[in-house]
Amino acid sequence: MRQLRVLLVLAEELHFGRAARRLYLSQPALSRQLRRLEEQWGVPLLERSTRRVRLTAAGEALLPRVREAVAAADVLRAAVMEQERTGTGQVVLGCYVTALPVVRALVERVRGRWPGLKVTLREVDLVEQFGALLDGELDVVLCYGPVPRGVQSLRLAAEPVVACLADGHPLAGRPSVTLAELAGVPVVGLSPEVPQGWRAFWAADPRPDAAPVSYTGHAATSFEGSLAAVAQGDGLRLVSAACRELFPRPGVRYVDVADAPPCAALLAWTGARRDVPEVAAVRWAAGGLAGSGVPDARWWERLT
């Protein structure tokens, strides 16, 4: 369904850049989604040139059926939600690994108010945390911002950002560093399917002094995968300060970044699902856990 929605947006925009911005994807990630669809179907769907993009004859012929399929999927999802409302209900909660400490408090608060509501947990990676949410595979997700277009959120807390460096790096022994001092250290590359705005924030790109940011050739999709690259001395990752205590790992050191803007721990959902009863229940529970907004690396301890 994600690939079909990509095709629909491209058919409307006839421009890869505009379509990518609407879908909050990089252009390479959008192109890969389209190529996969063309490979699965065995027909070219778009003609691409440096000057324009247009649907092929096959693309024009199939487009009405694609619209019907997407509309039918939306109707089916609505029917499933209606069935959930008439029964005990279920909500699928996605959780990015660094947000795990708050899960227990959130689930206990939901179950205390609605004991018949089943909360199913699903661990997600950097691509899935928003991709699966937008595709309707998740109802809500615990994550760190920023969120892409089409996603709404509630801030649970603000938190400082720290640099994760190999323990042998010359800066690893410092109590704190600045972004300017990190200018010569490449950032571990994330998958291009991770939303571009999220990748940019967690690389502090652009930097305050406009210094260019370099990236490694990795295409990491997971927290642990990127930490492994750091431990090998390939580059750095900017992460939430809670990682210092939650994820100590041999070979890496967490160092304060004095001038990095704080990050936000969030509960996120799509605008289309905002008022679904199960989603509203989790939003209510999260509202009772939301912090003061003051950056605090140990905010999650107040909830567990």
Image: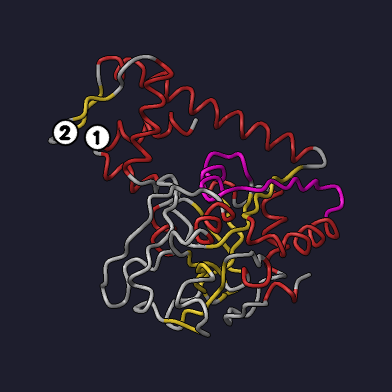
Q: Which mark is residue 133?
A: none
Residue 262: x %, y % from top left: 50, 75
Query: Mark 1: which amino acid?
Result: Leu
Residue 35: x %, y % from top left: 36, 27
Q: Which residues are magenta?
A: 114-138
Quarter of the figure that contains the C terminus = bottom right
Mark 1 sits on what residue?
A: 14
Residue 228 appears in the figure: yes
Which residue reaches farthest front? 168
Cα–Cα span, label 2 and label 1 = 7 Å
Against 187, residue 92 (above or below) is above
- Residue at the spot x=51%, y=74% of the render? 161
Mark 2 sits on what residue?
A: 52
Query: Mark 2: which amino acid?
Result: Arg
Within 10 Å of disc 2 (Cα), the crowding (few <14, some 14-19, many 20+) is few
Residue 238: x %, y % from top left: 48, 67
Decide whether residue 120 is among the magenta residues: yes
Nearest the camera: 109 or 190? 190
On the image, which quarter does residue 215 sit in? Answer: bottom left
Nearest the camera: 217 or 29? 217
Decide whether residue 132 is among the magenta residues: yes
- Residue at the spot x=48%, y=28% of the render? 70
Within 10 Å of disc 1 (Cα), the crowding (few <14, some 14-19, many 20+) is some
Q: Are marks 2 and 1 in contact (CB under 8 Å)?
A: yes
Nearest the camera: 107 or 276? 107
